[in-house]
Amino acid sequence: WQDYLKPGRPDRYYLTVGRWATVGGVALAVATALIASSFSNISNYLQTLFSFFNVPLFCAFIVGMFWRRASKSAGFWGILTGTLTAVIVYALYKQGVLSFRSDLHETMWGSICAFVVGAVSMVIVSLIEQPKTDEELHGLVYGMEIKDRSEVGKYSWYRSPFVLGMGVLALNAALYVGLYVV
């Protein structure tokens, strides 16, 4: 707050802001606890939150990483529309408009809808906007490899997105197998 939003204020001001932020945080925690208590178990609550927030974020990350045409504002609109879609599917389920076998089944379908709507939103917004140049995307988007062979020595193998991705997949597979062997 002090460094970015309101620099140069007296200490009393920052103390007051800190106290009100604490009150707001406690109120938010109480509201969250009340919402969580309406679920049958914590797993359903967490799955619902993940479908609201993690899936749209994952969608923006994946589309942005693998499609060089994706823009910043497309990521914003993808996250926003994906989150709204998941919330709407959840609300329709709770109102009895949509029928699913269970709460977890609803979060699965809500997540699928959130991902699809978020991805479609990102594509539409990206096609409206001016694309970035290849130089601006170098190293940020999969497939933006080094075209000049003289630059190959400048980049280490451990900075390759492919090598890092395969390493993460191998580590996840090993942990998954390790958990079920033990």
Image: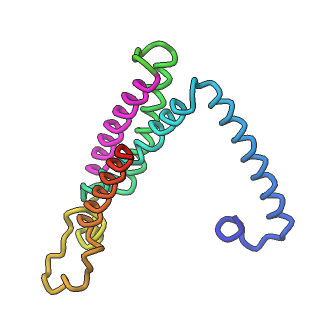
133 shown above or below 77: below
At 39% from the left edge and 34% from the top edge, which residue is drawn? 111
Residue 155 is situated, as x and y percent measured from the top left of the image, at 26, 80
Q: Residue furthest front?
A: 182
Question: How is the structure coloured here?
Answer: rainbow
26 shown above or below 7: above
At 84% from the left edge and 69% from the top edge, which residue is drawn? 11
117 shown above or below 173: above
70 shown above or below 133: above
Quadrant position of the N terminus in the picture:
bottom right
On the image, which quarter does residue 154 sit in?
Answer: bottom left
Tally the numbered discs.
0
On the image, which quarter does residue 71 sit in?
Answer: bottom left
Q: Judge left or right: residue 75 versus residue 67.
A: right
At 47% from the left edge and 25% from the top edge, which residue is drawn? 90
Q: Nearer the viewer, residue 70 or 24?
A: 24
Residue 106 drawn in magenta:
yes
Give the prevailing secondary structure in the magenta stretch. Answer: helix
Residue 139 is situated, as x and y percent measured from the top left of the image, at 28, 70
On the image, which quarter does residue 27 sit in?
Answer: top right
Q: Judge left or right: residue 165 versus residue 85.
A: left
At 44% from the left edge and 44% from the top edge, which residue is drawn? 54
Residue 28 is situated, as x and y percent measured from the top left of the image, at 69, 41
Q: Nearer the viewer, residue 120 or 49?
A: 49
Residue 39 is situated, as x and y percent measured from the top left of the image, at 58, 25
Q: Which residues are magenta?
A: 103-129
Q: Nearer the viewer, residue 177 or 64?
A: 177
Residue 125 drawn in magenta:
yes
